[in-house]
Amino acid sequence: MNTHTFGTHTTSRIGRRGAAALIAVVLAAATFALTACGSAPSAPSAGPPNSSASAPANDLDLVDHTPGLIIPTAMHVAPGADPAQARTVVHAAQLLYTFWNTGDTKYLDQAVTPDFRDNTLPPGRPQGPTGPRVASAGFRAAVPDLTCEVADLYITGDTLTARLVFRGHFTGTDNGIQGHGQAINFNAFDIQHVGAGTRINEDWHLEDNLTFLQQAGLVTVAGAK
Protein backbone atom coordinates (compact mmCIF):
# COMPACT_ATOMS: atom_id res chain seq x y z
CA MET A 1 0.00 0.00 0.00
CA ASN A 2 1.23 3.47 -0.91
CA THR A 3 0.79 5.92 1.95
CA HIS A 4 1.82 9.53 1.50
CA THR A 5 1.77 11.82 4.53
CA PHE A 6 1.30 15.55 4.29
CA GLY A 7 0.87 18.42 6.70
CA THR A 8 -2.38 20.37 6.68
CA HIS A 9 -2.90 22.04 3.29
CA THR A 10 -5.65 23.75 1.35
CA THR A 11 -5.46 22.88 -2.35
CA SER A 12 -7.67 22.03 -5.30
CA ARG A 13 -4.80 20.75 -7.44
CA ILE A 14 -4.26 17.73 -5.16
CA GLY A 15 -7.92 16.83 -5.48
CA ARG A 16 -7.97 17.02 -9.27
CA ARG A 17 -4.70 15.15 -9.71
CA GLY A 18 -5.54 12.48 -7.14
CA ALA A 19 -9.03 11.91 -8.48
CA ALA A 20 -7.82 11.71 -12.08
CA ALA A 21 -5.09 9.22 -11.21
CA LEU A 22 -7.46 7.09 -9.16
CA ILE A 23 -10.11 7.02 -11.89
CA ALA A 24 -7.50 6.04 -14.48
CA VAL A 25 -6.14 3.12 -12.50
CA VAL A 26 -9.60 1.89 -11.49
CA LEU A 27 -10.76 1.88 -15.12
CA ALA A 28 -7.60 0.10 -16.22
CA ALA A 29 -7.84 -2.53 -13.48
CA ALA A 30 -11.55 -3.07 -14.06
CA THR A 31 -11.09 -3.46 -17.81
CA PHE A 32 -8.20 -5.88 -17.29
CA ALA A 33 -10.03 -7.99 -14.73
CA LEU A 34 -13.48 -8.05 -16.29
CA THR A 35 -12.16 -8.82 -19.77
CA ALA A 36 -10.37 -11.88 -18.42
CA CYS A 37 -12.89 -13.01 -15.85
CA GLY A 38 -16.29 -11.84 -17.02
CA SER A 39 -18.53 -9.55 -15.03
CA ALA A 40 -20.37 -12.02 -12.80
CA PRO A 41 -18.77 -12.44 -9.37
CA SER A 42 -18.75 -15.69 -7.48
CA ALA A 43 -20.74 -16.05 -4.30
CA PRO A 44 -19.43 -13.83 -1.45
CA SER A 45 -18.40 -15.02 1.96
CA ALA A 46 -21.25 -15.68 4.34
CA GLY A 47 -19.20 -14.26 7.22
CA PRO A 48 -17.78 -10.79 7.89
CA PRO A 49 -15.09 -9.45 5.51
CA ASN A 50 -12.11 -10.55 7.62
CA SER A 51 -13.58 -13.82 8.87
CA SER A 52 -11.58 -17.02 8.46
CA ALA A 53 -14.80 -19.06 8.22
CA SER A 54 -15.39 -21.09 5.07
CA ALA A 55 -16.53 -19.04 2.09
CA PRO A 56 -17.85 -20.33 -1.26
CA ALA A 57 -15.30 -18.77 -3.61
CA ASN A 58 -16.68 -20.41 -6.76
CA ASP A 59 -17.26 -23.96 -8.00
CA LEU A 60 -13.55 -24.62 -7.39
CA ASP A 61 -12.52 -24.49 -3.75
CA LEU A 62 -9.54 -22.21 -4.19
CA VAL A 63 -9.51 -20.54 -0.79
CA ASP A 64 -7.19 -21.61 2.01
CA HIS A 65 -9.34 -21.75 5.15
CA THR A 66 -6.42 -21.93 7.58
CA PRO A 67 -7.48 -20.00 10.70
CA GLY A 68 -6.14 -16.47 10.68
CA LEU A 69 -5.93 -16.01 6.91
CA ILE A 70 -8.08 -13.30 5.39
CA ILE A 71 -10.96 -14.51 3.18
CA PRO A 72 -11.89 -12.55 0.03
CA THR A 73 -15.41 -11.17 0.17
CA ALA A 74 -15.92 -11.97 -3.52
CA MET A 75 -13.80 -13.80 -6.09
CA HIS A 76 -13.80 -13.71 -9.88
CA VAL A 77 -11.82 -16.42 -11.68
CA ALA A 78 -11.06 -16.44 -15.41
CA PRO A 79 -12.95 -19.14 -17.34
CA GLY A 80 -10.80 -22.20 -17.96
CA ALA A 81 -8.32 -21.27 -15.23
CA ASP A 82 -5.94 -23.99 -14.12
CA PRO A 83 -7.13 -24.92 -10.60
CA ALA A 84 -3.63 -25.53 -9.20
CA GLN A 85 -2.29 -22.23 -10.49
CA ALA A 86 -5.38 -20.32 -9.38
CA ARG A 87 -5.14 -21.85 -5.90
CA THR A 88 -1.48 -20.74 -5.67
CA VAL A 89 -2.34 -17.18 -6.68
CA VAL A 90 -5.28 -17.00 -4.26
CA HIS A 91 -3.07 -18.27 -1.44
CA ALA A 92 -0.43 -15.63 -2.19
CA ALA A 93 -3.16 -12.98 -2.09
CA GLN A 94 -4.47 -14.27 1.23
CA LEU A 95 -0.99 -14.13 2.76
CA LEU A 96 -0.27 -10.63 1.46
CA TYR A 97 -3.55 -9.13 2.59
CA THR A 98 -3.44 -10.89 5.94
CA PHE A 99 -0.21 -8.93 6.43
CA TRP A 100 -2.01 -5.70 5.60
CA ASN A 101 -4.95 -6.70 7.80
CA THR A 102 -2.82 -7.55 10.84
CA GLY A 103 0.60 -5.93 10.39
CA ASP A 104 2.23 -9.31 11.09
CA THR A 105 5.32 -9.48 8.86
CA LYS A 106 5.47 -13.28 8.91
CA TYR A 107 2.65 -13.23 6.34
CA LEU A 108 4.54 -10.75 4.14
CA ASP A 109 7.64 -12.97 4.23
CA GLN A 110 5.55 -15.89 2.97
CA ALA A 111 3.76 -13.78 0.34
CA VAL A 112 6.60 -12.08 -1.57
CA THR A 113 9.94 -13.16 -3.00
CA PRO A 114 13.27 -11.75 -1.72
CA ASP A 115 13.64 -9.88 -5.03
CA PHE A 116 10.08 -8.51 -4.98
CA ARG A 117 9.78 -5.28 -6.96
CA ASP A 118 7.32 -2.44 -6.43
CA ASN A 119 6.68 -0.93 -9.87
CA THR A 120 4.85 2.09 -8.40
CA LEU A 121 7.32 2.83 -5.62
CA PRO A 122 6.46 6.07 -3.76
CA PRO A 123 9.29 8.55 -3.13
CA GLY A 124 11.23 7.74 0.00
CA ARG A 125 10.05 4.14 0.32
CA PRO A 126 12.69 1.37 0.11
CA GLN A 127 12.45 -0.99 -2.86
CA GLY A 128 11.85 -4.70 -2.24
CA PRO A 129 10.11 -6.45 0.67
CA THR A 130 11.32 -3.74 3.06
CA GLY A 131 8.97 -1.27 1.38
CA PRO A 132 5.67 -2.82 2.53
CA ARG A 133 7.12 -3.27 6.03
CA VAL A 134 7.93 0.43 6.25
CA ALA A 135 4.56 1.45 4.80
CA SER A 136 2.59 -0.79 7.16
CA ALA A 137 4.49 0.34 10.25
CA GLY A 138 4.07 4.00 9.32
CA PHE A 139 0.38 3.64 8.62
CA ARG A 140 -0.28 1.72 11.82
CA ALA A 141 1.47 4.45 13.79
CA ALA A 142 -1.40 6.68 12.62
CA VAL A 143 -4.20 4.06 12.50
CA PRO A 144 -3.37 1.33 15.05
CA ASP A 145 -6.64 -0.57 14.46
CA LEU A 146 -6.21 -0.66 10.67
CA THR A 147 -8.01 -3.50 8.88
CA CYS A 148 -7.93 -4.58 5.23
CA GLU A 149 -10.90 -6.13 3.43
CA VAL A 150 -10.34 -7.89 0.10
CA ALA A 151 -13.64 -6.71 -1.34
CA ASP A 152 -12.99 -8.16 -4.82
CA LEU A 153 -10.28 -10.55 -5.96
CA TYR A 154 -9.78 -11.27 -9.68
CA ILE A 155 -7.61 -14.22 -10.74
CA THR A 156 -6.24 -14.26 -14.28
CA GLY A 157 -3.45 -16.78 -14.87
CA ASP A 158 -0.46 -15.92 -12.67
CA THR A 159 -1.79 -12.46 -11.84
CA LEU A 160 -4.30 -11.14 -9.31
CA THR A 161 -6.14 -7.84 -9.22
CA ALA A 162 -7.66 -6.73 -5.92
CA ARG A 163 -10.01 -4.03 -4.72
CA LEU A 164 -9.23 -3.36 -1.10
CA VAL A 165 -11.04 -1.42 1.62
CA PHE A 166 -8.99 -0.09 4.53
CA ARG A 167 -10.76 0.92 7.75
CA GLY A 168 -9.79 2.11 11.19
CA HIS A 169 -9.49 5.20 13.36
CA PHE A 170 -6.87 7.94 13.40
CA THR A 171 -5.87 7.63 17.05
CA GLY A 172 -2.10 7.69 16.55
CA THR A 173 0.19 10.26 14.96
CA ASP A 174 0.94 11.12 11.35
CA ASN A 175 3.82 13.45 10.49
CA GLY A 176 3.74 14.74 14.06
CA ILE A 177 -0.03 15.36 14.04
CA GLN A 178 -2.07 13.60 16.73
CA GLY A 179 -5.31 11.98 15.66
CA HIS A 180 -8.57 12.28 17.57
CA GLY A 181 -10.29 9.05 16.61
CA GLN A 182 -11.44 10.13 13.15
CA ALA A 183 -12.99 7.22 11.21
CA ILE A 184 -10.92 6.04 8.24
CA ASN A 185 -12.46 4.21 5.26
CA PHE A 186 -10.81 4.30 1.83
CA ASN A 187 -10.12 2.10 -1.20
CA ALA A 188 -6.95 0.78 -2.80
CA PHE A 189 -6.32 -1.17 -6.00
CA ASP A 190 -3.54 -3.71 -6.60
CA ILE A 191 -2.19 -5.78 -9.47
CA GLN A 192 0.12 -8.51 -8.15
CA HIS A 193 2.19 -10.88 -10.30
CA VAL A 194 3.08 -14.29 -8.89
CA GLY A 195 5.20 -15.50 -11.81
CA ALA A 196 6.67 -18.97 -12.04
CA GLY A 197 6.87 -19.64 -8.29
CA THR A 198 4.38 -19.51 -5.43
CA ARG A 199 5.12 -15.99 -4.19
CA ILE A 200 4.52 -12.50 -5.55
CA ASN A 201 7.54 -11.05 -7.37
CA GLU A 202 6.21 -7.64 -8.48
CA ASP A 203 3.23 -5.35 -8.15
CA TRP A 204 1.49 -2.15 -9.21
CA HIS A 205 -0.78 -0.30 -6.79
CA LEU A 206 -2.71 2.88 -6.15
CA GLU A 207 -4.40 4.05 -2.96
CA ASP A 208 -6.98 6.78 -2.44
CA ASN A 209 -4.63 8.72 -0.18
CA LEU A 210 -6.56 11.95 -0.67
CA THR A 211 -9.64 10.44 0.95
CA PHE A 212 -7.55 9.19 3.89
CA LEU A 213 -5.94 12.60 4.36
CA GLN A 214 -9.31 14.36 4.26
CA GLN A 215 -10.89 11.89 6.69
CA ALA A 216 -7.95 12.28 9.07
CA GLY A 217 -8.12 16.07 8.84
CA LEU A 218 -4.58 16.24 7.48
CA VAL A 219 -5.54 18.08 4.28
CA THR A 220 -8.41 20.20 3.05
CA VAL A 221 -9.39 20.73 -0.58
CA ALA A 222 -10.52 24.14 -1.79
CA GLY A 223 -14.18 24.07 -2.76
CA ALA A 224 -14.83 20.67 -1.14
CA LYS A 225 -18.03 20.36 0.85
Image: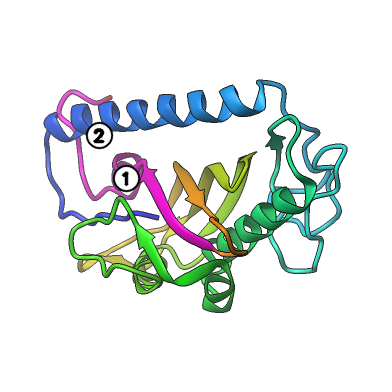
Q: Give the residue number, with chain letter if any, for mark 1.
A: 209
Q: Magenta segment, which residues?
A: 200-224
List the residue tagged with mark 2. 18
Q: Is residue 187 above or below residue 133?
A: above
Closer-to-camera residue (148/96): 96
Q: Residue at x 74, y 48 (%)?
A: 48
- Quadrant in the picture for residue 199: bottom right
Question: As displayed, is residue 15 above or below residue 99?
Answer: above
Based on the picture, tell me whether residue 171 belongs to the magenta stretch. Answer: no
Q: Residue at x 82, y 38 (%)?
A: 58
Image vertical order of residue 14 relative to residue 185, above or below: above
Measure the alpha-carbon separation of dots 1 and 2: 8 Å
Sort mark 1 into few (<14), some (14-19) or many (20+) by Cα contacts within 10 Å.
many
Q: Amino acid at mark 1?
A: Asn
- Residue 186 visible in image: no
Q: Quadrant of residue 175?
A: bottom left
Q: Which mark is residue 7?
A: none
**Lateral position of residue 110 relative to residue 146, left or right:** right
Q: Give neighbour class at mark 2: few <14, some 14-19, many 20+ (Cα, 10 Å).
A: some
Residue 119 left/right relative to 150? left
The x and y percentages for residue 124 are 19, 65
Q: Secondary structure at mark 1?
A: helix
Q: How is the image coloured?
A: rainbow
Please tell me which residue is depicted at 68% across the width and 52% down the height of the picture: 90
Q: Which image quadrant: the N terminus? A: bottom left
Disc 1 to disc 2: CB gap under 8 Å: yes
What is the quadrant of the C terminus in the image? top left
Q: Amino acid at mark 2?
A: Gly
Name the one closer to the observer, 202 or 22. Answer: 202
The picture places residue 215, in percent across and down from the top left corner, at 35, 44
